[in-house]
Image: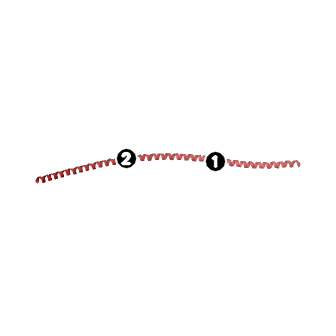
Amino acid sequence: MENKSYVEKDVFSEHEKFMQRFLAKMDEDRRFAERRLSEERKEAEARLSEERKAAEARLLAEEKRLSEERKIAEARLNEERKDSEARLSEERKIAEDRLIAERNTSKAIFITMIVTIILGFITIILGFISIILPSI
């Protein structure tokens, strides 16, 4: 019987040792997994940091390109506006000159009509005088 008890204690002791080794191995595996996860997290954070820096650099380059395009477009628009204003000013001057010429033409026609009417009256008066003078 004693032998049975001794065997049971021995089995129990071996089982306990096995469980301790098993738990120690599990702790070691857990620490290894934690270290691996920590390293992977650091690598992922570094990768994300690099990707963020690259994205920020691309964004900055795009903003610079758009700024340059905007400056070019504004300069082109400003030049077109100046050209349009100059063209409109020239067209306005031409239209004003044309209007002045039309007014002067109208005045000349009016003066010509008055002179023609006066000459017509003078011709009529001279005609009457020539009729009256021979009879005197």
* Type of amino acid under label 1: Ala
Q: Is residue 43 left or right of residue 103?
A: left
| Residue at screen point 12% across, 53% down | 4
**In this view, which residue lies farthest toward the front?**
1
- How many marks the image carries: the answer is 2
Q: Is residue 81 left or right of residue 36?
A: right
| Residue at screen point 33% across, 48% down | 44
**In this view, which residue lies farthest toward the right?**
135
| Residue at screen point 61% across, 46% down | 91
Q: Secondary structure at mark 2?
A: helix
> Distance of mark 1 from mark 2, alpha carbons?
64 Å
Percent coordinates x, y for residue 79 in the rendering: 54, 45
| Residue at screen point 48% across, 45% down | 69
For the residue carrying disc 1, how many other residues have a C-alpha within 10 Å: few (<14), some (14-19), or many (20+)?
Answer: few
Q: Secondary structure at mark 1?
A: helix
Would you name the residue on which mark 2 appears?
51
Q: Nearer the viewer, residue 7 or 49?
A: 7
Q: Which mark is residue 28?
A: none
Percent coordinates x, y for residue 71 in the rendering: 49, 46
For the residue carrying disc 2, how many other residues have a C-alpha within 10 Å: few (<14), some (14-19), or many (20+)?
Answer: few
Q: Could you tell me which quadrant the N terminus lies in?
A: bottom left
* Type of amino acid under label 2: Glu
Q: Nearer the viewer, residue 28 or 62?
A: 28
Q: Is residue 83 left or right of residue 132?
A: left
Percent coordinates x, y for residue 78 in the rendering: 53, 47
Could you tell which of marks 1 and 2 lies nearer the N-terminus?
2
Q: Is residue 95 left or right of residue 42?
A: right
Would you name the residue on which mark 1 appears?
95
